[in-house]
Image (cartoon, grey):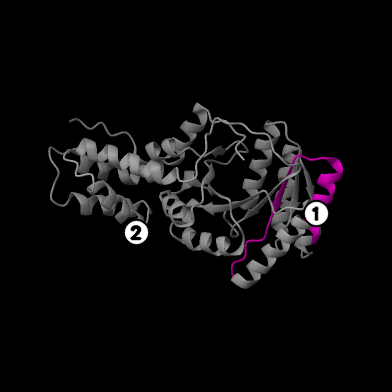
Amino acid sequence: MKIFRRNKNDDRATNQALSLTRNSLLSRLNDLFMRDSIPSDFWDSLEEILISADIGAKTAFEIIENIQLKKLDTLQLIYSALREELISRLLILNTNESEIDVFPYKPWVILIVGVNGSGKTTTLGRLAHKYQLQDKTVIAAAGDTFRAAAIDQLQSWAKELNFDVVAHQHGSDPAAVVFDALDSAIAREHDVVLIDTAGRLQSSNNLMAELTKLRNVVKRKIERDPDEVFLVLDASTGQNGFSQARAFADAVDVSGVILTKLDGSSRGGIVFSIVKEFGLPVKFVGVGQDATDLIPFDAEVFVDALLGDLSIDD
């Protein structure tokens, strides 16, 4: 459900956040495309550059193959085709960013999943702030009861941003926390419920069972599944994020990805493999340390920030 409008500050933030990835590519792209003619090793070199951005070998090969099928004869045309190919891969399930919709249900329930250290709880706080800016009332469920630090962190966000949070003691049943949060949301007519979850991947069976239990609690209380399930991925994990996405996609019906710590990573290309393999849209990207540093994803802005500014003459 898109309710956030992008602005030029968001575009600048995306550009700045991707500077590490872009800087690792730009000199090599310049060297490759700023030539008088297409060199014999051009396609191999381009594939190598794409893989170095953590786009993934399979995805890089498919991109190269699709461009080659166009039989383009100038570097400018090839560069334009590369840009279009990258953008199209991220638009697989994209919707109009300018649309602002009201929630069809109240409360609107969002389950937030991801491994420990991905920035899950911080992302929840930032989402709460975004919804508050849209005049939505927010309540959070501290469902990661296995880590006392996660409960404390969420309560700190709630205090700083002035949203409600339901938390039980460390080690308690996450399902009970979610049940109480939903109870409170319904009684007090909150617009949005944000559910934090544990992020331990030691056993996929345990993960499946835990997330299934939480989903069932939600369904029992509101008579439908969670309205959104956001998978939070740390951009710096690179291709490891791919295996994380698979584990969570197998465990719960993920509806979208939030890519965090983009400002501290040179591996932003992982987003292409995630979208390709799982058909999941990227909803937001984390680009800094502040509450406002979670911005709606824009495929065109992302790709332009990734590739940098190359002025290629005919």
Q: If the image is split into quadrants, where does the C terminus sit?
A: top left
Expressed as whole percent of the image width and height from the top left, the position of residue 159 reads 76, 41
Q: Nearer the viewer, mark 1 or mark 2?
A: 1
Front one among 18 and 302: 302
Callout 1 environment at 10 Å: few (<14), some (14 to 19), or many (20+)? some
Residue 36: quarter of image: top left
Q: Secondary structure at mark 1?
A: helix
> Left of 117 or right of it: where is 156?
right
- The stretch in magenta equals 176-202
Front one among 234 and 274: 274
Reading the chain from its start, which is encountered first: label 1 or label 2? 2
Callout 2 environment at 10 Å: few (<14), some (14 to 19), or many (20+)? few
> Left of 311 or right of it: where is 93?
right
Label 2 sits on residue? 58
Residue 259 visible (yes or no): yes
What amino acid does circle 2 point to?
Lys
Expressed as whole percent of the image width and height from the top left, the position of residue 74 reads 17, 38
> Left of 311 or right of it: where is 8?
right
Label 1 sits on residue? 221
Q: Is residue 243 depicted above or below 31 in this figure? A: below
Residue 190: quarter of image: top right
What amino acid does circle 1 point to?
Lys
Q: Is residue 142 depicted above or below 101 in this figure? A: below
